[in-house]
Amino acid sequence: MDLQLTDKIALVVASSKGLGKAIAAQLAAEGCDVMLTSRNAEQLAATRQQLLPSAKGRVEYCPCDITNLDDIRTLVAETRERLGPVDILINNAGGPPGGGFDQVDDAAWQAAFELNLLSYVRLIREVLPDMKQKGGRIINVTSSSIKQPIPGLILSNAFRMGILGLAKSLADELAPYKILVNTVAPGRIATDRTSYLDQLKADKRGISKEQVVAESQQNIPLKRYGETEEFARVVCFLASGASSYVTGSTLMVDGGMVKGY
């Protein structure tokens, strides 16, 4: 299948490690010119070097704190100058701290809002002028909590749902411009974030993290955690020209973990 990604310009947020890195690697291997970004310039430089051997397109990086509007504007301007106008935006961000309702204060709510919802809004706003001229793809990475709230993650549960509402609204508003907007929700994928959450659960229950992992795997029909590359391939398809009639959709990549429809 021709994914029609050669020479497309992709901006992949939070891409120095984890899911973002895997998505960037897959897009670059398919011929996209990719802009990497995160707050850590040293880590970005190392990630770029790791991606280059398999990349068919160009790979650049630009540090950015996505809770800062000026940084976002600089990031998009740098992408446009160094690679070209953005065709594909992969919205992604690290998850907020764990905790129940009584454990998070106003400062935590505000920080999570800026990181996990407002950053998506701002990034979309900055790339839209170019996308409205030629079409594009906007893919929002969220969490399985949009289908099944995760105990002890009140901040993530709240703001991930906001992204879902945003994406559904934009899919309708932006369809006349041939801009497709979709949401992809990972389940238990083997990342640092998943390891952190498993450790939190283990500490709360007074058991080992290995026991938590084993229990979690038993609740997944495929009986294992997913690999970042498996998630990235799904995102890559939605970002591609082969996915030309999918918008406003939410796709779970969770090994069948979420039991709801």
Image: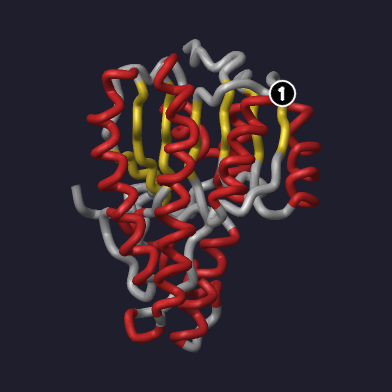
Q: Position of residue 194 (x, y in %)?
A: 52, 62
* Residue located beneath label 1 in the image: 58
Q: Residue at x 30, y 54 (%)?
A: 162
Q: Which one is in front, 136 or 208?
A: 136
Q: Position of residue 252 (x, y in %)?
A: 34, 44
Q: How is the image coloured?
A: secondary structure
Q: Which one is in front, 193 or 190?
A: 193
Q: Residue at x 44, y 23 (%)?
A: 131
State the SS at label 1: loop
Q: Residue at x 43, y 16 (%)?
A: 133
Q: Amino acid at mark 1?
A: Arg
Q: Which one is in front, 248 or 251?
A: 248
Residue 234 against residue 55 in the figure, above or below: below
Q: Position of residue 183 (x, y in %)?
A: 35, 40
Q: Position of residue 172 (x, y in %)?
A: 23, 30
Q: Which one is in front, 54 or 157?
A: 157
